Image (spheres, rainbow, N blue to C red):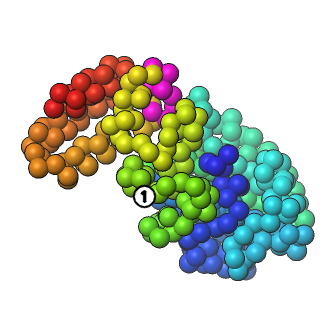
């Protein structure tokens, strides 16, 4: 639940971007397309759901609190969006078993776009992981963007490490989203007040989303997230094969290794040893990613190397 932006009813940060986009949407003509990009986990989806609720909830019971940036959980638009049935909101994301957003999802979106708008309000089509649009999906979307409907606005979200095709980008208002350390800590305290943010392990993660993912992983596997070092985490994973196969470890293992060596190189007097080990495992990681090698054997070798020095 913590990963879902709809459960984060208080928007922290992004003050300038929020006010500027709200003014644009409430101007004479809403933009046909908006692109938000930034580091994974900074809160782009949370930002968008607050922005959309501030527009769709206008003149409803429990209207969005624009001064405090708070969604009223009893607001009808919020409840409809929460259950993915709001008549003026359509969300597309890459399916778990797919490598790209396929044309069938776009065709379903076309059916939504052809329906009349509810209460004469703006209709939003949000496409998360927009860099995963394949060629056919992108070309289909261009047909709508090239002939904009004043009652429909597209919002594309993607990570800063990825790219969205230029033909779509050139037709949109583009925002690069950033978050500072103060707001990052404030967000974490707001959602996970019992979390010990002084734990060194959490300092390695640069965004709230990354911390929430790690928190959920520890919670699900009975790992003490408030008292966990990287060394302990690697040992725990290697002692439990089911953890090696978990989605979180598969996604984050290589970055955890990089974090480990970054910390060792910066804190150890014997820098050269860790530099050489880091270079060795960089090659191993590249081979692992390129040839889809066995993660268990890579972890066993890593634990053996760091224990033997």
Quarter of the figure with the C terminus: top left
Which residue is pictured at 85% across the width and 63% down the height?
75
Q: Which residue is mark 1?
A: 198
Dividing the picture into quadrants, the one containing residue 284 is top left
Q: Is residue 281 left or right of residue 13?
A: left
Q: Is residue 267 left or right of residue 55?
A: left
Which residue is pictured at 51% across the width and 31% down the height?
247
Q: Position of residue 94 (x, y in %)?
A: 60, 39
The foreground one among 211 and 67 is 211
Q: Residues within 10 Å of mark 1 (few under 14, many from 20)?
A: few
Q: Position of residue 185 (x, y in %)?
A: 50, 64
Q: Is residue 290 left or right of residue 28?
A: left
Residue 214 higher or lower than 21, as above or below: above
Q: Which residues are magenta?
A: 241-249
Task: Decide if residue 268 is in sight here.
Answer: yes
242 is within the stretch colored magenta = yes
Q: Secondary structure at mark 1?
A: loop
Residue 222 higher or lower than 210, as above or below: above
Which residue is pictured at 57% across the width and 39% down the height?
219
Q: Position of residue 146 (x, y in %)?
A: 63, 59
Dividing the picture into quadrants, the one containing residue 296 is top left
27 is within the stretch colored magenta = no
Q: Position of residue 234 (x, y in %)?
A: 36, 32
Task: Decide if residue 205 is in sight here.
Answer: no
Mostly what secondary structure, the magenta segment? Answer: helix
Residue 156 higher or lower than 186, as above or below: above
Which residue is pictured at 10% across the width and 45% down the height?
270
């Amino acid at each position: 639940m913590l990963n879902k932006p709809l459960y984060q009813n208080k928007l922290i940060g992004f003050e300038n971007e929020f006010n500027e986009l709200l003014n644009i949407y409430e101007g004479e003509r809403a933009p046909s397309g908006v692109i938000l990009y930034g580091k994974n986990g900074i809160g782009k989806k949370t930002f968008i759901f607050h922005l959309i609720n501030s527009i769709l909830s206008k003149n409803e019971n429990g209207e969005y609190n624009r001064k405090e940036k708070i969604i009223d959980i009893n607001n009808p638009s919020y409840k409809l969006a929460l259950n993915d049935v709001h008549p003026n909101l359509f969300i597309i994301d890459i399916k778990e078993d797919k490598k790209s957003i396929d044309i069938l999802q776009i065709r379903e979106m076309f059916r939504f776009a052809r329906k009349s708008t509810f209460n004469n309000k703006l209709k939003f089509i949000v496409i998360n992981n927009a860099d995963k649009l394949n060629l056919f999906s992108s070309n289909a979307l261009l047909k709508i963007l090239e002939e904009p409907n004043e009652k429909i606005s597209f919002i594309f979200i993607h990570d800063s490490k990825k790219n969205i095709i230029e033909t779509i980008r050139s037709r949109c208002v583009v925002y690069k989203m950033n978050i500072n350390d103060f707001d990052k800590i404030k967000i974490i305290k707001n959602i996970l007040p019992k979390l010990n943010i002084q734990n060194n392990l959490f300092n390695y993660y640069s965004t709230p989303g990354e911390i929430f993912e790690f928190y959920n992983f520890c919670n699900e596997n009975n790992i003490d997230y408030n008292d966990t070092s990287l060394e302990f985490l690697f040992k725990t994973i290697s002692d439990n094969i089911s953890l090696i196969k978990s989605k979180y470890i598969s996604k984050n293992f290589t970055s955890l290794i990089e974090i480990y060596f970054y910390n060792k190189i910066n804190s150890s007097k014997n820098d050269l040893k860790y530099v050489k080990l880091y270079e060795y495992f960089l090659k191993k990681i590249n081979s692992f990613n390129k040839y889809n090698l066995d993660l268990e054997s890579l972890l066993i070798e890593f634990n053996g190397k760091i224990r033997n020095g």
